[in-house]
Image (spheres, rainbow, N blue to C red):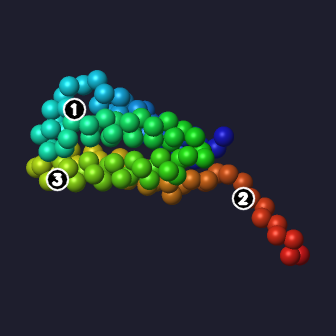
Amino acid sequence: MTVASLARWSLRAALSLVFLVAGATKFVSPGWAVRFTAWGYPGWCRWVIGTLEVVAAIMLLVSRTQKLAILSLLVVMTGAAATHLLNGEAPRAVVNVVIAALLIVLQRTRGAGRPPVDRHDGAD
């Protein structure tokens, strides 16, 4: 394993853990219910976001589903940043933007360190 692939795997694992914890707390912490209500969202919204975060956290660790997980989490982070900005919580939005940037780095480096696939088409 190269240093680059180890760094990439570490980023995947760290982001997965962040979203797993963030999503799981939405199910058990009454604070999230209060926040979502204060932001003007219906009560069920935190369950949907929590579920998306937990499922995508697991999907991040599976190469085949990683791209969909990243896209889903970018949508969640965009919504979270917008929510914070619209509610006068700009410092909280910075966290969402940083996490989104890390997700973009992860997407842009997908496949890095893998040997190129020989796509011989028989035209030789």
First reached walking from the N terminus: tag 2 or tag 1: 1
Q: Which mark is residue 85?
A: 3
SS assignment at label 1: helix
Q: Residue furthest bottom?
A: 123
User: Residue 120 location, x and y as percent?
Assistant: 82, 66
Residue depicted at x 36% and y 53%: 75
Residue depicted at x 26% and y 40%: 45
User: Residue 104 location, x and y as percent?
Assistant: 43, 55
User: Residue 82 location, x and y as percent?
Assistant: 22, 54
Q: Is residue 42 left or right of residue 47?
A: left
Q: Which residue is mark 2?
A: 116
Callouts 2 and 3 close, C-beta under 8 Å = no
* 92 in relation to 71, above or below: above
Q: Quadrant of the N terminus?
A: top right
Residue depicted at x 29% and y 31%: 26
> What's the amino acid at mark 1?
Trp
Q: Is residue 29 left or right of residue 19?
A: left
How far is the residue under mark 3 from the one under mark 1?
17 Å
> What's the amino acid at mark 2?
Pro
Q: Which residue is mark 1?
A: 32
User: Residue 96 location, x and y as percent?
Assistant: 29, 47
Hey, which quadrant is residue 61 in on the image? top right
> What's the amino acid at mark 3?
Leu
Q: Nearer the viewer, mark 3 or mark 1?
A: 1
First reached walking from the N terminus: tag 2 or tag 3: 3
